[in-house]
Amino acid sequence: MIAKYLLACASGMGFLCLIAGLSPVQALPSLEIADKNVAVNQDDGSYQKNDSHQSDLANNISSKLLIANETQKNLPSINQQQKNQDLEVDSAVNFWQPITPQSASSSPSSYKLAQVTSVSQLSDVQPTDWAFQALQSLVERYGCIAGYPNQTYRGNRAMTRYEFAAGLNACLERINELIATATGDLVKKEDLATLQKLQEQFAAELATLRGRVDAVEARTAELEANQFSTTTKLNGEVIIAGVGASGGAPNNSDSNIILVNRVRLNLTTSFTGKDSLITGLQAYNFLGGATGEGSLQQSLGLASPLLSSSSARTSFEPQFPGLNVNTLSSVGANSVQLYKLLYIFPVANKLTLFAGTAAETSDAFPAITPFYGEGQESISRFAGLNPVLRVSGGTSGTGLASAAGFIFNISPNLDLRALYGSVNANLPEKSANEAVPGVSTTPLGAGLFSGSSIIATQLTFKPSPALDIGLNYAHSYHEINILATGLVSSDIGALAGVATGTPLTLNSVGGTVTWRLSPKIALSGYGAAIFVDSASNSLDASTTFTSWMAGVHFRDLFKSGNTAGILFGQPLFRSDTGGSAQLTPTGDNRATPYHLEAYYRLQVSDNISITPGAFVLFNPEGNSNNDTTTVGVLRTTFTF
């Protein structure tokens, strides 16, 4: 049946597919599934790439919350930047970094075959000899050739013998059908004679075409028999890395070199061809737990006393390794977890909604910076995203929050995205037990609206093909005294000198800019400020954290597909305090921290990359008592 439709074309691109031995295209509606590779994400001449194939949706709600690439039109720079992200819906990577939902009419599958009643209607077929006249007569009587709705085959030239033979074969099959269905009396003897003469003249071309069609049908049958699913696409990412470090707190010996891994499998399902259900599974062997035990950061003496937050953290390490932070229960090394569960669906031409019980801010918001890509680009947590996106566990790496939001494409160069997220939405009430004085064993609260939560938004603007700008704002409420970014040790005890159980409100603002000087070189940077206030009526305390980063990103450096980055900046640092909050924690010698990083990603093949790199921390954690710290990484990433 497939062959019949393929050979029903008389000229142009349909026949060229057959002649070239390519897989023919039957213009029927096809399933369009979100792919990161949505990012969200596509070689449109812009600069950046997606991982994930999100990032954590944007690879990059990434994208490459990341939205399906085929379900939306792209904001070019954002989608390209997300193309090689980590298969994390980060990523929404990542899977849905595109900005404008694609209309049904924009799909390639909208070019549908329509029946043509006369050969003369095919404007690029020229009547040059008796064979054309004979075929014209057969087509007009038996309706055996189909063309495109605009009545052309987009060739603007005469038919080749192979193209003519394909049309002839279509008429042969049509007449065979009439005979087989006992309507043979409708086929005239003179037409059978004409067909026989045409067959003899075009015998070689017919044999060649039929052989190729048989091969295509066999290959199609094999693919259909072995396909994973008709509605679901499976892709994955495996990261294996060696990490070593020196420096850290005084009187600490250098830590051993460690070998770590992270494995992610992402299932992207579409039920309508325009929506996407993203299910992500992961396993990793990083350690940490509630006290940071076994983590590299703790061995350096640079981790917070709880949850191992530190500026020495790598990009692909979860924010809370070895711990279910919702209930403070432990997570074993390489145990399988659900880290992403998100549904994305368009409701209007410019409006897309999303909701899920395991989602991250980076799934919805484009990263803007080309350094983002946990498995492909920068090697540190500091470099990849603006800190505002990481507030309230927005990029925990474990799908910490239940979230819902929207993407509104104001224009092809401007979009607005927003979400509400609740961390412990699945818990009906807080635990009565205490982990530490004043802190419940469910430290993030409970309920959809009564626990720790965040409202975040991003305005993404592309004023020119070379410039991308992202502006962020987030308002958060925390049950305990933390920033929940995982970026620095002062993330825990954000209001220094204030009890851990003090609830907080956070107002965070930030901006990220990428300027492509050329197709292969881009300048990128961000700035952020987090304003922290006590939410307790009995306590007056406030703190302001600031951070910035600037760097140069290189594409196709030394070899096509290879990328590199050099960047410098200031990790989160207390710049101001008020009320009862301390500017410098007791025992620290206050100093501005700095971060210097360089990496080079070698694309070994389409599915394997190796990234050596290192970053240096000056005045780690804002304390000059700490030694200058160097963290070296050799990361190998497999994608499939």
Image: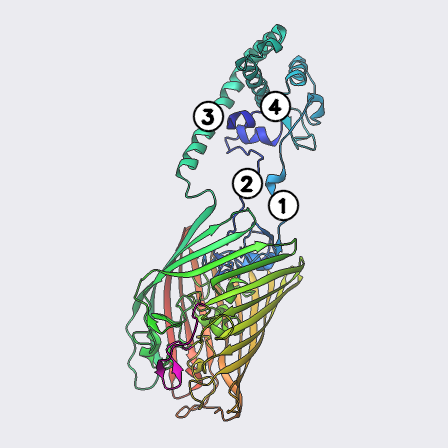
Q: Amino acid at mark 3?
A: Asp
Q: Secondary structure at mark 1?
A: helix
**549 or 14: which is nearer to us?**
14
Q: Nearer the viewer, mark 1 or mark 4?
A: 1
Q: Quadrant of residue 193?
A: top right
Q: CA distance from mark 1 to mark 4?
A: 34 Å
What kind of residue is marked 2? Ser
Residue drawn at x 38%, y 77% is 431
* Residue at mark 2: 30
Mark 2 Cα shell of 10 Å, populated few (<14), some (14-19), many (≥20):
few
Q: CA distance from mark 3 to mark 4?
A: 21 Å
Q: Main secondary structure of the magenta part?
A: loop
In the image, which residues are magenta?
426-443
Q: Earlier in the sequence, mark 2 or mark 3?
A: 2
Q: Secondary structure at mark 2?
A: loop
Q: Is residue 525 left or right of residue 411?
A: left
Sort mark 4 into few (<14), some (14-19) or many (20+) by Cα contacts within 10 Å.
some
**Residue 252's image quarter?**
bottom left
Q: In the drawing, what numbered circle is on residue 2? A: none
Distance in Å between CA atoms under marks 3 and 1? 32 Å
Q: Nearer the viewer's eye, disc 2 or disc 4?
A: 2
- Read off the residue under disc 3: 214
For the residues carrying marks 2 and 3, which lies nearer the camera in this image? 2
